[in-house]
Image (cartoon, grey):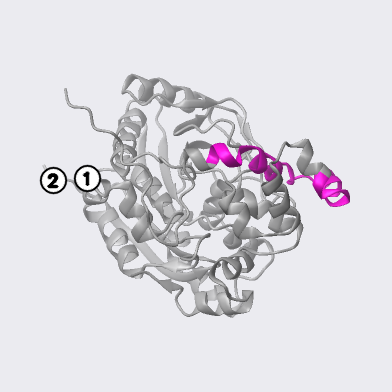
Amino acid sequence: MAEVVWGLATSHVPSIGAAMDRGKTETPDWRGLFDGYAPAREWLAQHRPDVAVVVYNDHANGIDLDVVPTFAIGTAEHYAVADEGFGRRPVPDVVGDADLSLHLVESLVDEGFDLTVFQELEVDHGLTVPLSVWTPDPGDAWPCPVVPLLVNVIQYPQPTAARCYALGQALGRAIASYPVDAKVAVLGTGGMSHQLAGARAGLINPEFDAMFLEAIEKDPEKLARIPRADYIRDAGSEGIEMIMWLIMRGAMNERVEKVHSHYFVPASNTAAAIALFDNRAPQDA
Amino acid sequence: MSAVAPSGPPDVPGTPVFDGRTSRRGLRMNRMFMSLRTAAARERFSADEAAYCAEFGLSPAQREAVVARDWQAMIDEGGSIFYVYKLALVDGRSMQYLGGVFTGTSEAEFVAAMRAGGHRHG
């Protein structure tokens, strides 16, 4: 049977990818962010999974506003990297795992999560930047196949934090019931606090972010109880995308072991963080 | 069984919430923004911006906002910031530039404010 081996939460700010693509990771503006990635990257290089589920949102690249699925999943064998308008990132296309995707669709629909299915999908920075945070030099291919799981965090009403956490828990059960001996990683992306438009543009809320970083490890149910409006007020109209971390966390065990976390301001207009959790921590009997 | 009506989008001062009504209002304009991902579309747009907007069925107010690069008006007329950003890219503008526009500062001032920890909540 398959097993979730680790979970990674990371911001997916496009400029993080651009800094890597343009060799700017050692500049004064960026060094603090990338130095903070190093311990996680070292651990991840030693813990390569067989497949990864990446929870993310699209930003007007792979999908438009004609159809706004609250939750969706890709079922393809291959996902091309989107050209977002400034040339596609010089990173490998993404190999899918259609068998796992189809297993997850059936399991999750049976659990009451009626996912939209993408048979074709171009993936944007929301998915490729987290892969780059994990693997800065992928060469010709990312470390493993990827299943994209998309969340509407752009158009209100976004799913509630509680629903995201419940989806994560169902995802964990679905992975555990996959009859293939596979090590599975789960990535929750986005955040942390930020707001791109309006008079509050540039909002950063380090107190909320610190609370969230602590609770995502130790008390995710507390985060699941936070109302949507509070996320918008406290983390910003775009900071609400942190609810995607709860899907990752829900798929993991009650007790996880934090490998590394790091918080940095700013990644362009955003507070950025990384948090890596080992899912093989001892559990209470 | 009690029926509870949803509360609707929150009213947070200085915070445009891109909700369903906003998305209805901005649908055609946002489609137009998204089309600008390809070089061929950007060239056609730049050759005659108003005509390109007309092709996508923008309202006069949306068209005027686009042609005048009135970024705040684009948001007010239903633009999603992620879609509006595609137009900024055509102009070689950054998200920090837009942040400056929305907060009434220059791009340099906005960048400096972010490096100083951002606009603190509260």
Name the disc covering residue A246, or none: none
**Image position of A194 (left or right of B88):** left
Crowding at dot 1, Cα within 10 Å, few <14 / some 14-19 / many 20+, comes out as: some
* Residue at the image point whose x is 74% and y is 59% from the top: B68
Q: Chain of mark 1?
A: A
Please provide the residue range marked out in magenta: B23-50
Q: Residue furthest left?
A: A285
Q: Residue furthest right?
A: B47
* Residue at the image point whose x is 41% and y is 39% from the top: A184
**Predominant secondary structure in magenta?**
helix
* Residue situated in front as seen by the camera: B99 or B11: B11
How many angstroms separate mark 2 from mark 1 (CA)?
Answer: 9 Å
* Residue at the image point whose x is 64% and y is 43% from the top: B30
Q: Chain of mark 2?
A: A
Q: Is residue A238 visible?
A: yes
The mark nearer the N terminus, 2 or 1, is 1
Disc 2 + disc 1, Cβ < 8 Å:
yes
Check disc 2 and report the residue beneath it: A284
The quarter in which the N terminus of chain A is drawn is top left
Q: Is residue A137 visible?
A: no
Residue B35 colored in magenta in the image: yes
- Secondary structure beneath label 1: loop
Question: What's the amino acid at mark 2?
Answer: Asp
Q: Same chain for the residues at labels 2 and 1, yes or no?
A: yes
